[in-house]
DNA sequence: CCTCGTGTAACCCGCCACGTTACAATCAGA
DNA sequence: TCTGATTGTAACGTGGCGGGTTACACGAGG
């Protein structure tokens, strides 16, 4: 019950970049450049994620998880919520046209 | 504790296509062609997902959720596990080189 | 033999994560 | 105030890949 159904959410879920920008990075006291080289990606990639202009991919989720001792699922999960929300709001009209399939069989 | 850590899993997580192929579709008694038109995608897309050769995207997750009365998160979650597993096994050497960041600040 | 359901090859398209290079702007410290 | 560090971001290029369409082959039943 406390579960999902982002369909009804009014606000866009928190982008992982926000967590990174507002909590993780400040706590670690790292510059974007430092973090980039630690993770083995470009500075630009870090910058765009912090600005929530690029998603956290499975690859980035693993890198972040390694660096900050969290689970990759945590980062990717945040991203998924955002992605689902975005897609839903972009195509909800189309989705509404899809009819429920009857689970007729095996009755 | 019972949670994630697919890093240690020996087997590849269940691909959503397997659920679709072995449970959902048979129960619904639908042909691939029927399902495709119901969801508004091509037959090929359905076929490749059933064969686990293509991921369930956020878009497909929403479509499946509509058609089968489930949550999009369920479908996408399955896919994420597979994606994380695949990425991890493809690049674990590289990830192991990433050092843990000290949460030095705010002590 | 013909049809239905299905696998899949071939071809095309558009999107996008990511890298590199480079430049401008901001800011802190000497 | 000059300077170096940090950061935003434009420009350009690349590879990967989700997805559509068309078309052909094959197996199972009628």
Image: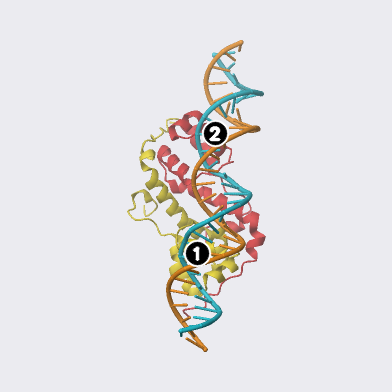
Chain colours: A yellow, B red, C orange, D cyan
Residue at x 54% of width, y 68% of height: A68
Residue at x 64% of width, y 64% of height: B96
Residue C26 percent coordinates (x, y): 42, 73
Q: Vertical placement of A52 versus B57: above or below?
A: below
Q: Which residue is mark 1?
A: A47
Q: Is residue A3 left or right of residue B98?
A: left
Q: Nearer the viewer, residue A56 or C10?
A: C10
Residue at x 43% of width, y 64% of height: A18
Quarter holding residue A62: bottom right
Quarter holding residue A40: bottom right
Q: Chain of mark 1?
A: A
Residue A26 percent coordinates (x, y): 47, 73
Q: Which residue is mark 2?
A: B44
Residue A20 percent coordinates (x, y): 47, 66
Quarter holding residue D27: top right
Q: Is residue A19 left or right of residue D23?
A: left
Residue B45 percent coordinates (x, y): 53, 36
Q: Vertical placement of C13 versus A58: above or below?
A: above
Q: Is residue A5 visible?
A: no
Residue B28, numbered label: none
Could you say whether the residue bearing mark 1 is in a helix, strand or loop? Answer: helix
Count of numbered labels shown in the rendering: 2
Residue at x 55% of width, y 59% of height: A60
């Amino acid at each position: 019950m406390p579960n999902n159904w982002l369909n009804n959410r009014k606000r866009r879920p928190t982008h992982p970049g926000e967590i990174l920008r507002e909590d993780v990075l400040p706590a670690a006291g790292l510059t974007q450049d430092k973090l980039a080289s630690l993770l083995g990606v470009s500075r630009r990639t870090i910058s765009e994620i912090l600005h929530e202009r690029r998603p956290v991919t499975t690859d980035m989720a693993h890198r972040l998880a390694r660096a900050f001792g969290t689970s990759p699922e945590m980062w990717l999960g945040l991203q998924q919520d955002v992605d689902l929300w975005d897609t839903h709001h972009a195509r909800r009209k189309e989705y509404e046209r899809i009819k429920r399939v009857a689970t007729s069989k095996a009755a």
